[in-house]
Amino acid sequence: MKKFKNIKFPKLKKPFTVALMGIIMFSLIGFVERNQHDKLCNNIAVEIDNQLENHFINEQDLIALITQNGNKQIIGAPLYKLPLKKIEQEVMNHKYVDDAEVYKDLKGNLVVKVVQNRPIARIVRPYAPDAYISEYGEILPISDRYTARVVIVKGLLSDRLIEEGLKEKNNGDDLLKLLKYLQQNKWWQAQIAEIALDRSGNITMYPQIGKQEIYFGKAEKLDEKFNKLDIFFKQILPYKGWNHYQKVNVNYKDQIICE
C-alpha cells in the first residue's frame, strides 16, 4: 500500500457532489415509481384505532365500503390506478369515522388507517330512533352491532338536538361542555346515569345509585356545582343514607338544598 501513499486524489467540489446526489436520488425515485407502476394491489390492510373501546365499525365494513360491496375491484387492480384521495374521502364520509388515511405501501398493499368516532352520550326518545353524541358534538346514528355504555340524555329538547345538532340556540354547546366534563372524570361517569333537559335547557340529573332528582340548572359554573355535588355524595349521603332525600338542588350559589 506504500506506493499509493503519496498519490493525491482529486477532491470533488461541493456543487458537483450535490448534483451527483440529486442524480442518484432521482434515479432511485424513478426506479421505485416504475416498480410501483407494475405492481398490482395484493391486499387491503385495515387498521382501526380505539377498536377495543368501540365496535361500531370493523375491517369487513370498511372493505365493503371501499369495494362497494365487492362490485369495485381493488385487489388485483394496478396500484397506480387506485384513486387514493377519493377512497380516503369515502371512508371519511362514514358516520363512525373520525379520521382516515389511505395510502399504498411498498409491499403492494392498500393501507387504510381509521380512527373511530367516540360517543360520550346517547339521546333517548320514546317515539323516534335514538342517537349518539360524539366527543366533538356530532350526532351519530345508533348501531345494531354495538351499544356504548354512556350517559343518557332525554327530555323535551331531544328532538331538536338530533335534528339541529348541538348548537347555541338549543343549549347544545353548553350540554357538550357538561358531557365532556363528565367524560373526563371517572368518578362522575360512575355516578351520573341520566340527564334530562327541559325546553329552556335546564338540567335534572339522575344518579346510578339512589333515587334522587338532582336539579342542576343550566350547564354553567360546572366546577362550582360539581363541588357541591361532591359534598352531597361523599359527606351527606353516607351520613343520612342513600335514599334519605328525594330531591337535591345545586343551582343556587353556596347552597345545597336537600328535600
Image (spheres, rainbow, N blue to C red):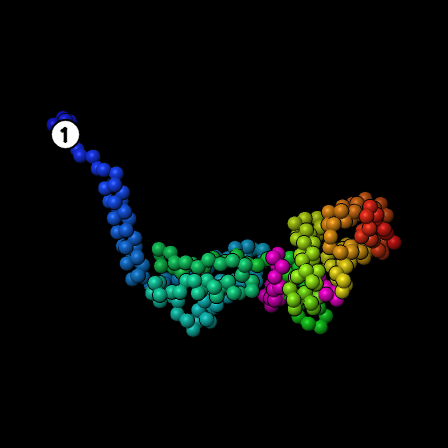
Residue closer to the observer: 75 or 103: 103
- How far from the left and from the top, in percent, is residue 209? 77, 54
Q: Is residue 219 left or right of residue 147?
A: right
Residue bearing mark 1: 7
Percent of width and height locating residue 191:
73, 52
Spot occupied by residue 75 in the image (x, y as percentages of width and height): 38, 66
Quarter containing the C terminus: bottom right
Instruction: Tell me: residue 26, above or below residue 81.
Output: above
Q: Is residue 116 magenta?
A: no
Q: Residue at x 86, y 51 (%)?
A: 258
User: Is 51 displayed left or right of 168 in the figure?
Assistant: left
* Vertical order, 2 against 111 (above or below): above
Residue type pointed to by label 1 = Ile
The residue under the point 57% across, 59% down is: 117
- Residue 53 visible in the picture: yes
- Residue 177 percent coordinates (x, y): 67, 54
Quarter of the rendering occupied by the N terminus? top left
Q: Nearer the viewer, residue 61 or 162?
A: 162
136 within the magenta span: yes
**Which residues, given as a range, are shown in magenta?**
134-157
| Residue shown at the point (71%, 66%) measured from the top left | 158
Image point 52% across, 65% down: which residue?
Answer: 93
